[in-house]
Amino acid sequence: MQWRGRRQSDNIEDRRGMSTGGMGGGGGFRLPTGGRGGGIGIGGLVVILLISWALGINPLALLSGDMSTDSGSQQQQTGTRPQGQSSDETTAFVRTILAETEDTWGKIFQASGETYQKPTLVLFSGQVRSACGNATSASGPFYCPVDRKVYLDTDFFRELSQRFGASGDFAQAYVIAHEVGHHVQNLTGVLPEFNQRRQSM
């Protein structure tokens, strides 16, 4: 996937290497990672098509499984970084994909006479504290509607490849676009309505 040389988002908080103290249960919406009743719904398909269009990928190639990538492995990250100062390839990739979602959703909202409110993406390692509660890497990527932030441990990319057999840049881009999709649901009121109906069941 040709992603290098594109605009990168500044809406990133790099909390990797930071301690969060005691951990408890976390909230938010997490990426379905197979197992019981998983799969991609209509919303997921729309996000896939939008991101493929934004990145210049033929959606028919995706449906036929003909995926080629120009980047294989991701570098393992260690140490503490000043917030917003990471320049490694994984962070550059995340910044680029987030920027693509910002541009794409910005145009869609603008066409409806509205302004897209961009989410912040938080990079963390091991565990993180959000307005929805505390979470660990085992929770997977998630979106917190309370603080309107997407949370991602980039080590999940390695798990995607090794555990779920979903390697390559596009699978990683889908993870980011999926969580941003929850942000769009939150902005449009779909997510709060879903939460209300789920609580009443």
Image: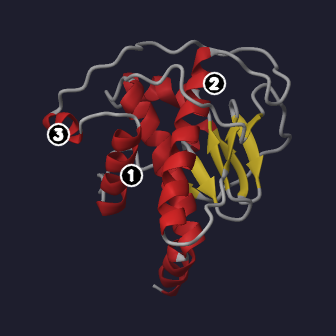
Secondary structure type for disc 1: helix
Residue 121 lies left or right of residue 169; in this view the side is: right
Label 1: few (<14), some or many (≥20) within 10 Å?
some
Q: Position of residue 123 (x, y in %)?
A: 68, 35
Front position in the image: 190 or 200? 190
In this rendering, does residue 35 appear at all? no
Q: Are marks 2 and 1 in contact (CB under 8 Å)?
A: no
Q: Residues within 10 Å of mark 3 (few under 14, many from 20)?
A: few
For marks 3 and 2, the one nearer the N-term is 3
Q: Position of residue 113 (x, y in %)?
A: 55, 72
Task: Report the amino acid beneath label 1.
Answer: Val
Residue 47 is marked as 1
Sequence-wise first label, 3 or 1: 1
Tell me which residue sits at (51%, 40%) in the image.
100
Quarter in which the C terminus is drawn = bottom left
Q: Nearer the viewer, residue 103 or 85?
A: 103
Residue 60's disc is: 3
